[in-house]
Amino acid sequence: MYRILKPILFSLDPETAHHAALASLKLSKPFLPLFSPRLRVKDARLIRMVFGLKFPNPVGLAAGLDKEGELADAWGELGFGFAELGTFTAHPQEGNPRPRIFRLPAQRALINRMGFPNSGAEAAAKRLSALRKSGRWPSVPIGINIGKSKLIPLEEAVEDYLESLQHLLPYADYVAVNVSSPNTPSLRKLQEAKPLKKLLNAVVKAASGKAVLVKLAPDLEEKPLKEAAEIALSSGCAGLIAANTTLSREDLPEGAYPDGGLSGAPLREKALKTLKTLARFTRGRVPLVAVGGIFTAGDARQRMEAGASLVQVYTGYIYEGPSLPARLCRGLLEKPTSNMKPPRH
């Protein structure tokens, strides 16, 4: 079905297509259990225990697709082993001016400069509270991704993150701290040692024992990347996410490209390099989550062999369609990674 729908969606402006797809999915939620058996792969070999949480499979939805958390109860039915919602900010914000998403079909890539558009953490908390009261709370772990509000000065970032956390912590199985989006002015400065330490110490303390992860940029050189990882570990973070979108265009053909974060297939090598650097440095002290350019089971397997406990997809999902999580899971079962039990014959 996606082969039929994809040309229609890709004929639309990318952001219009995004909203149309989410609206269609919202309408389809009552019928998802009918399709779920084909989209969910259940096998004990896929189960992961990470951050003290049970993941039915290692393939998750990356932050950025379900920005408002409106489909929290759908992603597990669509085959994901977990879903990361957001990015949420303490203050409602419209994000950057449109157009702000650009497709590069030949490269299987996206460029986005969204700027965290969302209705704010308090509104999201009300939405998630209503979902929980409805009895339809998702059966897979839910991550809550939080970022800095654009209107808040960098020196007040800690209080801004904590305000989001206060509203959303009750609905988080884990919290992802986004300090690496390239689309909010000065946000990446929070990856520097002093502000990062202050922020993570405060968030870990406020999270009251729930797992806190920090999402890092693939554009960091090795020394600042290791420094950021060491600060995350010393602050008590439970894991690291490698990696966010890139500002680099070095893996694209020569040409003029819009500003914003590049994701998809051209990010694959940069994200893998970031993951390998973190894996060498952390040496298993904390779990790693890999994201960026994952389109195939081979991509997922490569990240897990490089040290990732879990993987996430976003751009690959847009290009490959709703069958992607199941295909990744089946591929991992056909050729297990070294930390998976071999299949029984």
Image (spheres, rainbow, N blue to C red):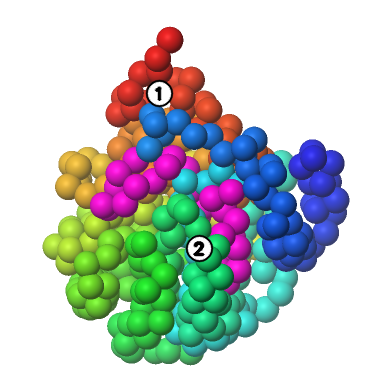
Asked if residue 165 is positioned above or below residue 223 in the image, the reply reads: below
> Which mark is drawn over residue 137?
2
Q: What residue type is labelled 1?
A: Pro
The nearer-to-camera label among 1 and 2 is 2
Foreground residue among 19 and 223: 19
Question: What is the total number of numbered labels drawn onto the structure image?
Answer: 2
Spot occupied by residue 9 in the image (x, y as percentages of width and height): 80, 53
- Left or right: where does residue 8 sit relative to residue 120? right
**What stretch of residues is rendered in magenta?**
48-77
- Element type at marker 1? loop
Question: Any magenta on residue 305?
Answer: no
> Which mark is drawn over residue 310?
none
Q: How crowded is mark 2: few (under 14 residues within 10 Å), some or many (20 or more)?
A: some
Tell me if I can see residue 277 in this picture. Answer: no
Are the residues at dot 1 and dot 2 in contact (C-beta closer than 8 Å)? no
Q: Which amino acid does label 2 sit on?
A: Trp
- Left or right: where does residue 64 sit relative to residue 210? right
Residue lying at 49% horizontally and 70% vertically, measured from the top left = 132
Foreground residue among 109 and 42: 42
Foreground residue among 133 and 238: 133
Spot occupied by residue 323 in the image (x, y as percentages of width and height): 64, 38
Q: Quadrant of the rendered structure where residue 14 is?
A: bottom right
- Element type at marker 2? loop
Q: How far apart are marks 1 and 2 (CA)?
A: 31 Å
Q: Quadrant of the rendered structure where residue 29 is?
A: bottom right
Asked if residue 249 is positioned above or below residue 283 in the image, the reply reads: below
Q: Main secondary structure of the magenta part?
A: loop
> Which mark is drawn over residue 336?
1
